[in-house]
Each structure stands twice: as structure tokens, then as C-alpha cells.
């Protein structure tokens, strides 16, 4: 499992012209979490990812999402597993198919919510427009 976590003051996901998920947190910052799932990921990877998203001290003053009650916008992103070593066309064969990935992304969302974190989401499998205002900029890649 792979995630790109970006510290943001705001972020939103639009599908077919309608905003389906958004966070706005100019005082504390929040996290835009792009999540990619591969074939051998399972519940343990999800639980580790939840802990990382909630507890990494990547917000201002070395605080975590849990420390400041920051919101998280979770967006599934199979392209995080694109292979570009050969040729000009990325290979997506390392990305898990939707029927495998969607329940795992949902588990991450539920895990964050169980911790009391405000979570917004995109729409799994949809063509989404994601906009964000990055703070820092501060972006990390997490692998579980």
C-alpha cells in the first residue's frame, strides 16, 4: 500500500461538476491522502496506513492529525502503482483491481473515522478533479 500525504489548508474533489468531498482548515491544516493499493495488500496494511495518517507529525509545530483534530480528504489513486521504467506508456499491472482495492480504501476511511477524525472522500473509480492548496509545501510518501 502506498500513500502520498500532503499538508493542505484546503482540498476538494469534484465529480461531474459537483463537489463530493472537501476539507477547509486554514488555521490547523489537514491532510490530502492519495491512496494506492497493490495486489498483496490486506487488513494489516490498512491498519498501519490509518495509524500513519493519524499519527505522523507532519502538521505545523510537529503536530499530527490526532493532536489537532485535523480533517483528512481520502482519494483512491491506482496510478500510484504505475510502472514507468520501460517505454512511454505506464503499466498499471501493480495496482490492485477495483474489487480488491475498494474495500481496503473503505477500511482506511472507517479506521480514521473510528479514531474520531473528520474524513471526506472522493468517489472510488470515478473520474475526479482534485484541487488543493498545499501548505509548506509538505508532502511525504508512505509505504505499508
Image: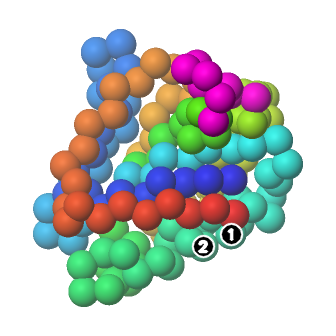
Residue 139's image quarter?
bottom left
| Front one among 38 and 99 | 38
Give me the residue at 38% from left, 20% from top: 15
Q: Which mark is residue 51?
A: 2
The x and y percentages for residue 21 are: 36, 38
Q: Which mark is residue 48?
A: 1
Residue 138, relative to residue 18: is it above or below?
below
Residue 119, relative to residue 140: is it above or below?
above
| Front one among 39 and 103 | 39
The 10 Å Cα crowd at callout 2, few under 14, some 14 to 19, many 20 or more, is: some
| Front one among 108 and 36 | 36
| Front one among 98 and 123 | 98
- Describe residue 82's horizontal placement relative to residue 93 as left or right: left
Whether 75 is among the magenta residues is no
The x and y percentages for residue 1 are: 69, 53
- Describe residue 61's horizontal placement relative to residue 20 as left or right: left
Question: Is residue 103 visible to the viewer in this orientation of the structure?
Answer: no
Q: Which mark is residue 103?
A: none
Residue 22's image quarter?
top left
Q: Secondary structure at mark 2?
A: helix
Instruction: Name the chief secondary structure element in magenta.
Output: loop
The 10 Å Cα crowd at callout 1, few under 14, some 14 to 19, many 20 or more, is: some
Give me the residue at 34% from left, 26% from top: 129
- Describe residue 116's horizontal placement relative to residue 144 as left or right: left
Q: CA distance from mark 1 to mark 2?
A: 5 Å
Q: Which residues are magenta?
A: 85-93
Q: Report if the CB atoms under discs 1 and 2 are less than 8 Å apart.
A: yes
- The C terminus, quarter of image: bottom right
Amino acid at each position: 500500500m502506498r500513500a502520498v500525504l500532503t499538508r493542505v489548508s484546503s482540498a476538494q474533489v469534484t465529480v461531474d461538476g459537483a463537489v463530493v468531498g472537501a476539507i477547509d482548515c486554514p488555521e490547523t491544516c489537514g491532510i490530502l491522502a492519495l491512496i494506492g493499493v497493490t495486489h498483496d495488500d490486506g487488513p494489516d496494511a490498512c491498519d498501519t496506513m490509518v495509524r500513519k495518517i493519524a499519527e505522523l507529525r507532519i502538521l505545523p509545530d510537529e503536530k499530527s492529525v490526532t493532536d489537532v483534530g485535523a480533517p483528512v480528504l481520502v482519494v483512491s489513486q491506482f496510478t500510484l502503482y504505475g510502472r514507468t521504467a520501460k517505454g512511454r506508456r505506464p503499466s498499471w499491472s501493480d495496482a490492485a483491481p477495483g474489487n480488491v482495492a475498494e474495500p481496503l480504501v473503505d477500511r482506511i476511511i472507517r479506521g480514521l473515522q473510528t479514531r474520531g477524525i473528520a474524513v471526506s472522500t472522493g468517489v472510488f473509480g470515478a473520474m475526479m478533479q482534485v484541487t488543493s492548496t498545499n501548505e509548506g509545501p509538505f508532502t511525504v510518501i508512505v509505504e505499508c
